Amino acid sequence: MSERIEKLKQAIELTEHCRADHVETRVVLEGYGEAPIWEGVVETFQLTNHPTAKRAYAWLRGVAHSPLEKPEEEYTIVLGLPPVNSPETAVRAAIMAIAAKARQ
């Protein structure tokens, strides 16, 4: 298992208080018309002993607060609860959550 997948697994297990087993890796490209909005690698995990979800979708991205700063890793975890049922719908849900937060 890669270091990136292991970090995501640990983050899920710590935040969701359950066991997470890696299922698959998928590249997701989400766009609006011809314009790309988000592109990245999404990991799917099977959850054991989670009270409501059987799957979680997770990814990492580097966030730099200035051009001279080393990027910090930012974790995104989306539980597989309706309507989220795939890496693609997890990305869409995360984009919608960011947009809703920005409007507040």
Image (cartoon, helix red, strand yellow):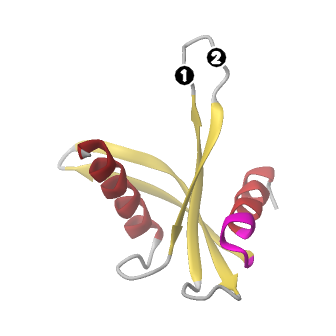
Q: Specify start and end residues of the magenta stretch as a single range.
A: 13-19
CA distance separating discs 1 and 2 = 7 Å
Q: Which residue is mark 1?
A: 65
- Quadrant assignment, res 24: bottom right
Q: Horizontally, is 2 left or right of 12 in the view?
A: right
Whether 10 is among the magenta residues is no
Q: Is residue 50 above or below residue 27?
A: below
Q: Position of residue 18 (x, y in %)?
A: 73, 79
Q: Position of residue 11 (x, y in %)?
A: 71, 59
The residue at 58%/54% (across/down) is 59
Along the line of sight, which residue is nearer the eye, 55 or 51? 51
Along the line of sight, which residue is nearer the eye, 91 or 28? 91
Q: Horizontally, is 39 left or right of 104 in the view?
A: right
Are the two marked residues, 1 and 2, in contact with CB atoms closer than 8 angstroms?
A: yes
Q: Horizontally, is 82 left or right of 46 in the view?
A: left
Q: Which residue is mark 2?
A: 69
Residue type for callout 1 = His
Residue type for callout 2 = Glu
